[in-house]
Image: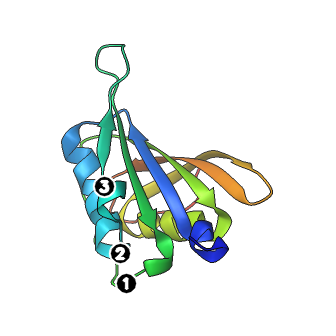
């Protein structure tokens, strides 16, 4: 994998949501970005009851250019994006095209960034509100 590919690889982790909401978010991302079979969506269930994290790794360099369609969520979904700055920016923009996005903070390193977002349904998505 080249440095440029690494800059666009983004890990997306969703929490505080059910399978239907996770599939809606991953469906939007899957329509725009590719993921290889070894990067397919998976669930991680910690020992605590009802605590599930839904995870997917996407290649944001492979953006198809197709516009994201709005998707409905049953409630707020917490999303954590981590990876190279350019890749995370592309994934955040894609999510903002389909959902109402509230920025809940970020931690930036030299070559990587982690961004925490809250996703929701809304007729007029807003990036960076809040």
Kindly tell me whether residue 73 is visible in this rendering: no
Classify mark 1: helix, strand or loop: loop
Residue at 69% over, 56% down: 112
- The Cα atoms of the two marked residues, 2 and 1, are separated by 5 Å
Residue at 30% over, 67% down: 30
- Residue found at the far top of this picture: 48
Question: Mark 1 — residue?
Answer: 64
Ranked by sequence position, the earlier of labels 1 and 3 is 3
Image vertical order of residue 48 relative to residue 4, above or below: above
Image spot of residue 89 (x, y percent) = 59, 67
Question: Mark 3 — residue?
Answer: 40
Classify mark 3: helix, strand or loop: loop
Q: Is residue 101 left or right of residue 31?
A: right
Image spot of residue 78 (x, y percent) = 44, 40
Pointer 1 with pointer 3, Cβ within 8 A: no
Mark 1 vs mark 3, foreground winner is 3
Image spot of residue 41 (x, y percent) = 30, 50
Q: Is residue 56 left or right of residue 60?
A: left
Mark 2 vs mark 3, foreground winner is 3
Q: Quadrant of the N terminus?
A: bottom right
Image vertical order of residue 44 relative to residue 62, above or below: above
Image spot of residue 82 (x, y percent) = 58, 52
Image vertical order of residue 109 relative to residue 51, above or below: below
Pointer 2 with pointer 1, Cβ within 8 A: yes
Ranked by sequence position, the earlier of labels 2 and 3 is 2
Near mark 3 (Cα within 10 A), the count class, few <14, some 14-19 or many ≥20, is some
Classify mark 2: helix, strand or loop: helix
- The Cα atoms of the two marked residues, 2 and 3, are separated by 15 Å
Question: Mark 2 — residue?
Answer: 32
């Amino acid at each position: 994998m080249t440095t440029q590919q690494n800059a666009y690889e983004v890990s997306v982790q969703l929490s505080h949501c059910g399978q239907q909401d996770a599939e809606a978010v991953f469906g939007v991302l899957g329509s725009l970005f590719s993921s290889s079979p070894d990067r397919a969506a998976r669930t991680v269930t910690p020992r605590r009851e009802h605590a599930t994290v839904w995870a997917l790794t996407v290649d944001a360099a492979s953006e198809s250019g197709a516009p994201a369609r709005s998707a409905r969520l049953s409630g707020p979904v917490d999303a954590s994006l981590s990876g190279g700055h350019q890749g995370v920016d592309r994934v955040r923009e894609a999510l903002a095209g389909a959902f109402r996005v509230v920025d809940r903070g970020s931690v930036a390193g030299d070559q990587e960034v982690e961004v925490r977002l809250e996703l929701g349904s809304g007729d007029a998505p807003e990036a960076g509100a809040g």
